[in-house]
Each structure stands twice: as structure tokens, then as C-alpha cells.
Image (cartoon, rainbow, N blue to C red):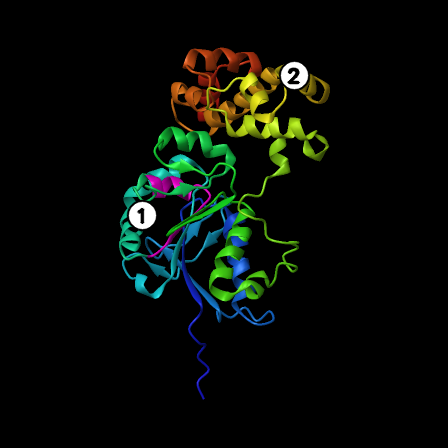
Amino acid sequence: MSTALPRPDVRLLLLPLPDFALLPFGAFLDKLRFSADDEDHSRQRYCAWTLLGIDAAPVASSSGVQVNMDTTADAVDLAAFDYLVVFGSRTVQASRGYVQAYGPVLRKAAARGLPLVAIDNASFLLAEAGLLKGHRVALHWRHVAEFRHAFPRIAVASEQIYCFDSDRITCAGGTAAIDMAVELLSRHCGRVRAFKGLADMLVDAPRHQGHHLQSMEGGGPDLTRHLARAVALMRSSLAEGLTVADLAERIGIGRRQLDRLFTEQMGMSAHDHWTKMRMEQAHWRVTNSHHSLAAIADEVGLGNASSLARLFRQHYGTSPGALRAGRAST
């Protein structure tokens, strides 16, 4: 009597880039595992996955944990899968830099009609490979301005944690990988099986793709509705040429009222809070990228490198160049 399992409802090829983040990878994979079998047997019965590498060597995550590959780019049968899921590297520069090594297999999969899924910074790799033209992209909020600067013709779904757009699926990363996995599995295995295991993962319910993160508001749930909306708009509009008056108009209140709300709850004016946000993002970009100061200034809406350098020194007591030089020496 044969003990072979029936053909799974959905088959996924998982491609972790070197230095990938364990959180979205583990979250996505464990959601597959819970839905893949009855009870907690962990067989790949209703959904199946295979780990793909450029070669047979293990791939190290950003935390140093290594994952063994099941197949290689030159040996894989793409026709045996329904999706190719790519997990991005820790930095944007690394993800984009892998286009020469990983671009051929991605383009081959796309040419065969295999839907591509980009999680975390993998969207930068797909965009660099020319595989996101005409599609909307969901990104981690920290990388929205950088993506728009690098790929201005690709639409960004800035208020979504994941986005299904035809044969391209993108996800901001982190625990949003669970939410996206539930939606993907629902389309192939049914809602009941897609939801299986959420309680075991201590997840109340999957979030909709347009879920608004309270943590984005910078002050938690105690913020007033108008102030929470203003903070969220500031964060998503760092690179845009908006003024505080523009924000107040979008929210539906006066400029003076908005400043009063910020002063009462944040201890500073709306303009100063927005500048603080911009400088925090600029500090992160200076520390975690090799982009020019002019490019970073453009990404955070400061216009030019001299303005960035002046404000940077005011906020951090050092210049961007000195900060980079200090990190390089260590």
C-alpha cells in the first residue's frame, strides 16, 4: 500500500538571500508548516516548500544562523512550483547587489509565469532586475523613501503591510509575513486551513493588508486621533515637499491647532517633530548605507547635502562623514 502523500494544493520555492532576516523567514515558514498537515504532524501534505540556493552551500542569516538548501538554481524544476518566494538581505545595498547572481533565476521564473513573492528588502532585488514594472509594492516604512528615490516609476503601496498585485506579491517583512502567508494559503487551501495554527503562534487574527500600525504613530494609543494621523502622515511623507500647513489641511484642522496638539503631547512643534523624524531616518541611512549625502538628503526631504550636514551636526554633535569614518574604523 502506497504511503505517498497527494499533490499539495500549493507548492512554494523559497529563496533566502545571504544575510536574510530570520523573523519573516521563520514566521512565513512556520505558518506553512501549521497549515501543511492535519493536527501537528508537520508533513508537507496540503502545502509544500523547497529551499533554493544559487549553489548547494548553506545560506547564513543576518544573525549567523545557517540554513541548508534543498536544490540549486541550475538543478531546480521551476514547473514543479506555484510560487517563488524571495527573502531579502539585511541591507538594501546587499539585496540590490545580488541582481547579477540571482537575476537569471528570477527572470527565468517570471518568464515561465511563476508568480514572484518579495519579502522584506527583496523588493529592491526584483526592482533592480526589472521585474516590478507596472506593479505596486508594499515596503517596510523605513525603506519607502529610498525605494521611491531609486525606482521613481514603481508605485509604492505605502500604507500596506503586504500587497497582492497580479503575479507579484510584496511584503514589508517582520511579522507581516504571517499575515501575507494566511492570505496566500486562503486562496489555495481555504480559509479554515489557512487560519490553522494561529493560536499556537499566539496570533489572534491575521491583519488585513491595509492594517495601520499604532507603533508608527510614535506615541502609542494615547495620542489623539488628529495627532496620530499627523504623525503617520509625517512618517510616510518624509521625502515629499509637504509643509505642516499641508498636513493640517489633509487632516482637516488648522495649522495652529495642529501645533498646539504637538506641543501639548510631544513637547515640541509639529515642524520640530517632523525634523526630528527626518534626522532619525537620515542617521539610520548614513549608518547603514553607502549612499551620498545628497541622495539621503533627497530621501528625507532636506533638499541638499549641506542642509543635511548642518542639521545632522546640530542633532548628533558630529558630521555624517565623521560618523561613517568612525564606523568604518571599528
Q: Alpha-carbon neighbours of circle 2 within 10 Å: few (<14), some, or many (≥20)?
A: many
Disc number for residue 288? none
Q: Pinpoint residue 154: horizontal percent, then vertical percent.
A: 36, 36
Left or right, residue 80 beside residue 209: left
Residue at image coords 73%, 32%: 222
Residue 326 located left or right of residue 71: right
The x, y position of residue 159, in whole percent, is 52, 38
Q: Is residue 142 above or below residue 79?
A: above
Amino acid carrying mark 1 in the image = Tyr
Q: Quadrant of the N terminus?
A: bottom left
Instruction: Using the image, determine if residue 18 lies above or below residue 159.
Output: below
Residue drawn at (44%, 44%) of the image: 19
48 falls in the magenta region: no
Residue 259, label in figure:
2
Instruction: Tell whether 225 sits left or right of 125.
Output: right
**Label 1 environment density (alpha carbons within 10 Å; few <14, some 14–19, many ≥20):** many
* Residue 76 visible: no
Read off the magenta span: 114-127
Residue 197, image x and y in percent? 61, 62
Q: CA distance from mark 2 to mark 1?
A: 49 Å
Residue 102's label in the rendered image is 1
Q: Nearer the viewer, residue 72 or 162?
A: 162
Q: Quadrant of residue 232?
A: top right
